[in-house]
Amino acid sequence: MTKSFIAGLPKAELHLHIEGSLEPELMFQLARRNNIPLSYRNVAELKAAYDFNNLQDFLNIYYHGMNVLRTEQDFFDLTWAYLEKISKQTVRHIEIFFDPQGHLARGISFETTINGIHAALVKGQQQYNISFGLIMCFLRHLEEDDALATLEIGLAHRDKIIGVGLDSSEKGNPPEKFIRVFAKAKAEGFRLVAHAGEEGPPEYIYGALDKLKVDRIDHGNASMQDPVLIDRLVAEQMALTVCPLSNTKLCVVDDMKNHPLPLMLKAGIKATINSDDPAYFGGYINANYEAISPLLADDPLLLAQLARNSFSGSFLDEAGRESLISEVNAYLEQQMSL
Ligand code: ADE
Ligand code: ZN
């Protein structure tokens, strides 16, 4: 019952790294197509390596995996595979990340990357009615000058990009390292998001809010350690893009039954459910809702609240947000009358 309720619930995905949707089978297919060696002999061996103790363990394999992405067609195929999956999960809107520096460093041009991803997104909008926004992320383990140079390149594609984000190794790379590039991105009219408080402390969330001036926080788990920060997130109605299966896979949360999401909702935080890197973490967006649902006593009102939050926390315009929230309300009403 809950599974089918979640399956039909209209929702947005606001935290998805497109390179993290690279399934092992497609990774091997592209490795063969492009003649790229992989450190694993087959899919089973690769999957066996998906046993992470922390974020860095995962990132090492994630950067290795993206080596197989070489051509515009590869980026199209990657993005299209993701869209085909979520087209069966009642996803109505997506705002997804890509990591241009992870490709530029391998000699793959910004154009190759973005044109392949964007063409698939346009097709997804036409074929599946899934609207989209594309967010270019800066890799925080690299220097700010590298991010600034990447932003400069990205400006030529501003018509395809709604925002900038900050990802990769969090600890030791605080938001303050990226003040100039975020200020420049804001001046250029981009929306701003940053991973903060995934493995890092609450101070990194303050840094993202106060120094980077973000519009949304990715993860934000560490906010639950700081009651003053909780009050602030509630007062500002700041959306958090929470990723349950990611959190347990990367040992940010020791056990799903201890996940902070129910406490976030109870406090009044605008928390949303997302899949982060679904090919590596064992499930797409509906699997993430299903993983959290028992902690919410499978309450359809709370599941619908999460879906509403995903639209109100999105970068859609007011009319777009309202229209999709109405779809959630209509769905809830119809389900409750059954
Ligand atoms: N890059 C891809 N997934 C990430 C995550 N969960 N945290 C930080 N950087 C990432
Ligand atoms: Zn992420």
Image (cartoon, rainbow, N blue to C red):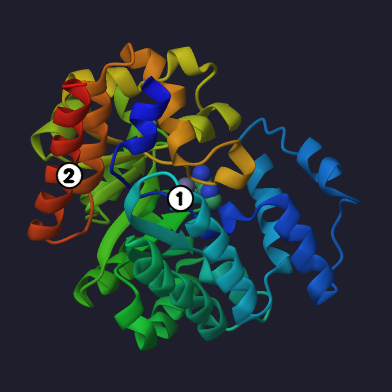
Is 206 on the left or on the right of 98, as rendered?
A: left
Viewer-proximal residue among 91 and 279: 91
Ligand 2 within 8 A of label 2's CB? no
- Figure quadrant of the N terminus: top left
Task: Name which of mark 1 and mark 2 comes first in the sequence.
Answer: 1
Residue pushed farthest front?
338
Query: Is residue 72 in sight in this rendering?
Result: yes
Note whether 9 is above or below 12 in the view shown.
above
Note whether 34 is above or below 285 in the view shown.
below
Mark linked to residue 168:
none
The residue that appears at 56% across and 83% down in the rendered structure is 112
Q: Amino acid at mark 1?
A: Ile
Q: CA distance from mark 1 to mark 2?
A: 17 Å
The residue that appears at 16% across and 25% down in the rendered structure is 268
Query: Is residue 142 in sight in this rendering?
Result: no
Position in image of residue 177 (x %, y %): 40, 58
The residue that appears at 27% across and 74% down in the rendered structure is 184
User: What residue does disc 1 label?
Assistant: 86
Q: Amino acid at mark 2?
A: Glu
